[in-house]
Amino acid sequence: MWRRRKQRDTSVPVLEELRAQWRERETALRKARREEQLISKRLLRDLTEEGAHGSDDHMLEENAQSHFMSVEQIAKLIEDLQREPEQMITPLTALRHSLRRNDVRLMFTRVEDSMRVLVALFTCPFTDIQMEAARCLHELSHSNELQVSMACLPATPYLLTYLSGYSQQFTVLCLYTLGNLIVDSEEVRNRLLLQGVIPTFAKCTQSPHMDVQEALGYAFSQLLQSKEAPEKIIPHVNNALLISQGLVSKLVPFLIEKAALITKQESLDLELLICPVIRCLGNLLGEVDSSGTKVEVQDGRLLIALFVFIQHFKDEHPFMVRECLWAVNNLTVQDPVWTSALLNVNLLPALLQLLAHSKDVFLMIATILHNIADLGLGYCQQLREKGVLPCLTPALRDDDIQVARISLELLNKLLTYCPDVAGDFFHNSGLQIIELHKDKPDLQQQVQAVWNKYQELIKGTSGPPSMD
């Protein structure tokens, strides 16, 4: 039977291989789409609908989506926008709906005086007109055409100024508009840096409103993910100043509160808000002053919150796992208090279960385990009792040099402080693992260190088997 099946369809292996390749591509695309959420533009269509004018506004929206607007019609609309204030709302609302079309966005920016008039309305003293103009700018910011984003540059100083505006809704709209514009080009980002975008964003951290904080996280993450961020943007972020202003003491309870919401399943779509906040906190936790002192965090619930996020987001949003582990790493490095908290609350099993999640996650967890082992005998004994070595053994056999290297370094640290680990390791295929890597040039130092440690521990007894 098996022979006949093979003769009948010799293409099956090829088809299976093609299906496997297709599944791999689909998995990669899904992952890329999830990761892209952090850098894609966001359109607040629900927010821009607030304050609409009933059925007339609904008719305007339908008309904008179903009819093309010519250059002449746009020019006439701009004329209408220069009338008395009480006559501006209707044409301005019509413009907003029309700007939902990509072709209209492009044509609008090409019409003479269009942006000058829109910016003038955005800066006028009438709040309803100002809000409607802000909605128009937000529609323009969602365009993927560089020409449109460049045309919006005259509005950026006012968008920054109005972040301390008269309403929460207005501030949120300005932040998302800035976040969309930041994506488009280095020139836009350079202009914003010169206009003081970073200190302005820093002031927004004082807002008590969750919507403002979420919008700020979006805009700031757009800025920090640009290719020039390491050279031009991150150096402008004064971590010491942020710490001195008490930012850490605000971020910690914020994250604890969001973890509580997730635990109660009251709010499940918080990843775009939480991710930049955790990244910011992780960076601040890694800050060390001139005297070698780290940032002090007193609330132990932070550790629980980070693990709540890890468990909740590990399948759908793996980038959240990496951000949380980065913060855990900076909490535990050379810190017996936080390391003891991690062990005492029994969070180590959750870490060990994630070792097989992905290479990036494995490397982060191995670094955290190294932090624990680095604190000495008592901590290494706890790692041994919790079964770290059996979980580490597959990685010690791994062909990936980076994975094998950090695993061997962790093993060497365990052998240094806890001699009992030697027996566990070498009684469970330890010599075969050493043999596996002994001829790899990139691992010579790590392999030799483990071998030397083993020889030291068995000195005075029968010698170990030769590696030659």
Image (cartoon, rainbow, N blue to C red):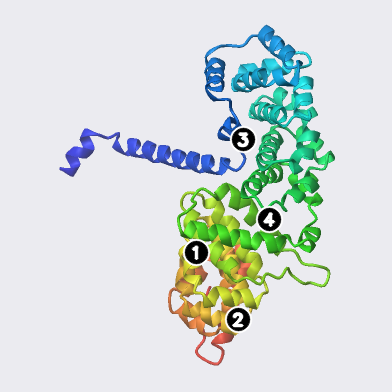
Amino acid at the residue labelled 1: Ala
User: Mark 2 falls on what kind of element?
Assistant: helix
Q: Quadrant of residue 51?
A: top right
Figure check: 139 above or below 12: above
Which residue does the numbered mark 4 point to in the structure image?
Answer: 280
Residue 318 location in percent, x, y?
A: 52, 52
Q: Disc 1 to disc 3, how far (Cα)?
A: 39 Å
Is there a contact, CB below 8 Å, between mark 1 and mark 2? Answer: no
- Sequence order check: which comes first, mark 1 or mark 3? 3
Q: Disc 1 to disc 2, how far (Cα)?
A: 20 Å
Which residue occupies 62% across, 72% down? 371
Amino acid at the residue labelled 3: Lys
Which residue does the numbered mark 2 point to in the structure image?
Answer: 416
Figure check: 384 above or below 97: below
- Sequence order check: which comes first, mark 4 or mark 2? 4
Amino acid at the residue labelled 4: Cys
In the picture as drawn, the residue positioned furthest to the front comes out as 86
Which residue does the numbered mark 3 point to in the structure image?
Answer: 41
Is 60 or 438 nearer to us in this picture? Answer: 60
Is there a contact, CB below 8 Å, between mark 1 and mark 3? Answer: no
Res 450 seen here: no
Q: Disc 4 to disc 1, how far (Cα)?
A: 31 Å
Amino acid at the residue labelled 2: Thr
Q: Disc 3 to disc 4, how far (Cα)?
A: 21 Å
Which residue occupies 73% across, 48% down? 204
Which residue does the numbered mark 1 point to in the structure image?
Answer: 395
